[in-house]
Image (spheres, rainbow, N blue to C red):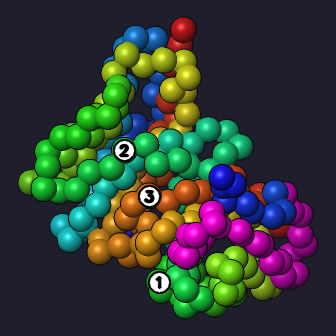
Amino acid sequence: QQQVKQSPQSLIVQKGGISIINCAYENTAFDYFPWYQQFPGKGPALLIAIRPDVSEKKEGRFTISFNKSAKQFSLHIMDSQPGDSATYFCAASKDGNQFYFGTGTSLTVIP
Amino acid sequence: KAGVTQTPRYLIKTRGQQVTLSCSPISGHRSVSWYQQTPGQGLQFLFEYFSETQRNKGNFPGRFSGRQFSNSRSEMNVSTLELGDSALYLCASSLDPGGLYGYTFGSGTRLTVV
């Protein structure tokens, strides 16, 4: 059973546009929600993370929106750039135990 | 500062063989976690070691095992390889157990079972 469901599977956005990736989770005990970015041939790298006591966290062009009641969280990439083209994974964990990852979103930003 | 180093980068094995993958964490990191990445399933947690002790284990068969040495380096072993074990195996290290301050992933070992 997929603990974290991610959509869309792939996304194409024009340069300067907003990229939005969504995730939904099942376990209400999850208390940490990171997003990872992965380039081809590399391992995932931590991009931004949020805890359920806040509804939004912003770091530069990247924003996580968190809806605890709906058990959903999303990543917004503002002013998307070709260099943002990568695969993005959402994840969730409880008490520092294993992370459950979404299946990934392949983002392509067209110049 | 050196990152997480995984060796080898690529590996081709025959069904039924066994394989050992190696991971050297960032200096000072005592937690090492292993993940299997496949196109259909994404990243699936295998196990985590902290200070030479297995702290958590994912839902994989007993053919998958690991260990951690006193210098925090870790190895993962897969015995009796199956075609379905073909995947990218990622190692991640962190200062704290559970990676709550962020994992640093290596570039992975691409295992192909033929």
Marks 3,1: beta carbons within 8 A: no
Q: Which residue is identified by label 2?
A: A48
Q: Which residue is identified by label 3?
A: B102
Question: Secondary structure under badge 3?
Answer: loop
Q: Are discs 2 and 3 located on one and the same chain?
A: no
Residue at 46 percent of width and 48 percent of height: A46
Query: Per the image, is B15 magenta?
Result: yes
Main SS, magenta region, reads strand
Nearer to me, B77 or B42: B77
**Residue segment shown in magenta:** B10-37
Subunit that carries the residue with mark 1: B
Q: Position of residue A5 (x, y in %)?
A: 35, 53
- Give the residue type that dot 2 points to: Ile
User: Closer to the observer: label 3 or label 1?
Assistant: 3
Indicate left or right for A4 with B107 as reference: left
Nearer to me, B107 or B14: B107
Residue A4: tell me if it is visible.
no
Question: Secondary structure under badge 2?
Answer: strand
Numbered mark located on residue B56 in the image:
1
